[in-house]
Image: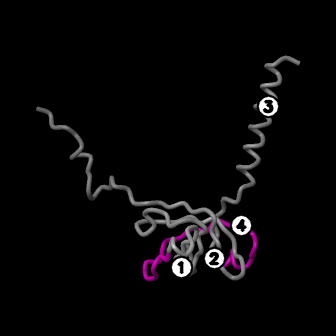
Amino acid sequence: MSRLNIVVILMVAVLMGTLFSVFTANSESVVFARAFAEPGIEFKVSGTLDTDHPVMYDPMVEVAETRFHMRDKDGALQEVVLRKAKPTGLEQSESIDLYGKVVDGQFIATEMLMKCPSKYNEESHSLAEAKPEAG
């Protein structure tokens, strides 16, 4: 068997493994009610930070724990324990995707993705301002 055949077989195996992991990953976003109905199973929950409750992070007590409240797509409010240091820009985020599971009656998130507002929105920057004047 030539080296080229071995390389091609390895590349196909890696590609198949990657595709399998992508399609079996839980990318469906659910609401807190579903996550609490099936404790111990990892879910993605999407929502927004509830600014009526403070974000609690004290690195002197626990470096890798941030607590905050989030509203899911149905409007249900839930306290979340994020097993990471407080992400920069959490309070300014437009939306949050949490990856975690319910353990002992708490939603424990291990990963979090935030969508932050763009600094290039129509109100502060228009395309007309960006075009140089002909002259």
Q: Earlier in the sequence, mark 3 or mark 2?
A: 3
> Mark 3 to mark 2: distance in Å?
41 Å
The residues bearing labels 1 and 3 have C-alpha atoms spaced at a distance of 47 Å
Q: Residue at x 73, y 43 (%)?
A: 18
Mark 1: secondary structure: loop
Q: In the rendered image, which residue does mark 4 sit on?
A: 42
Q: Residue 32: give its label.
A: 2
Residue receiving disc 3: 10
Q: Residue furthest front?
A: 60
How far apart are the alpha carbons under marks 4 and 1? Answer: 20 Å
Compared with 15, 127 (above or below) is below
Identity of the residue drawn at 34% across and 55% down:
119
Identify which amino acid the numbered label 2 is placed on: Phe
Residue linked to disc 1: 75
The amino acid type found where label 3 is placed reads Leu
| Tag 3–tag 2 contact (CB < 8 Å) | no
Q: Which residues are magenta?
A: 33-57
Horizontal side of residue 129 vs 67, given as left or right = left
